[in-house]
Image (cartoon, helix red, strand yellow):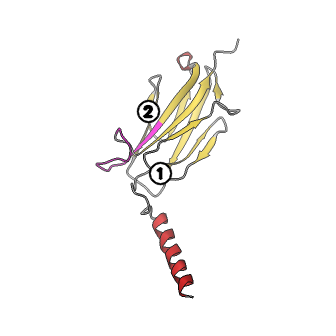
Amino acid sequence: MLISKRSTTYEALKAFFVEENVDRQFNVPTFVRVVDNRGNERHFAPPEGGQARFVDFRGGPAGDLYPGDVLSIEVEVDESFTGYQVRWLTFNGDRGEGGSINLTIEHEHVGEQMDIRFEVVSAEPWHRLHGDIDDMLDLRYRVLPPKK
């Protein structure tokens, strides 16, 4: 009976610390979900170690884009955090702030891979990842030449 009570108490304490994010070595905001207007959606667990997140949509049915398409993406950050900033960029020079974007695909985006990076930055004076960020999410699409 004593083991059973200890086990129940341990599980209750563990659940409390997980709920309060105290179980994390770096208690910082992280991405929990991404969805786009192409039908792609991913949910994420808290990252382990110094890992960022990489999602390659190119192999799926909704990973190809064409010039003139509008790509809309929304990211969600763990709602237990406040006071953070989300910013995004493409490696074609597009930049912005906030958890949602509407990007018109242009000829300059054509290529085997177009990456869109989201970063979340807390107000802490330290950060979980190199580059003064707490979490990073790279989304990879393919942009095909215009249809003729």
Quadrant where the image shows the C terminus: top right
Q: Judge the density around disc 1: few (<14), some (14-19), many (≥20) Cα neighbours within 10 Å.
A: few
Location of residue 73 in the rendering, given as x and y in whole percent from the top left corner: 56, 37
Q: Residue furthest left?
A: 125
Q: Nearer the viewer, residue 86 or 56?
A: 56
Q: Secondary structure at mark 2?
A: strand
Q: Which residue type does callout 1 highlight?
A: Glu
Q: Is residue 106 left or right of residue 17?
A: right
Location of residue 57 in the rendering, given as x and y in whole percent from the top left corner: 62, 34
Q: Nearer the viewer, residue 76 or 16?
A: 16
Q: Is residue 15 left or right of residue 126?
A: right
Instruction: Provide the major secondary structure of the magenta segment.
Output: loop
Q: Nearer the viewer, residue 70 or 148?
A: 148
Q: Which residue type does callout 2 highlight?
A: Gly
According to the picture, the residue beneath numbered tag 1 turns out to be 48
Which stretch appears magenta? 118-131
| Image disc number at residue 67 | none
Mark nearer the viewer, 2 or 1: 1
Magenta stretch: residue 128 in it? yes
According to the picture, the residue beneath numbered tag 2 turns out to be 96
Magenta stretch: residue 7 in it? no
Q: Secondary structure at mark 1?
A: loop
Quadrant where the image shows the N terminus: bottom right
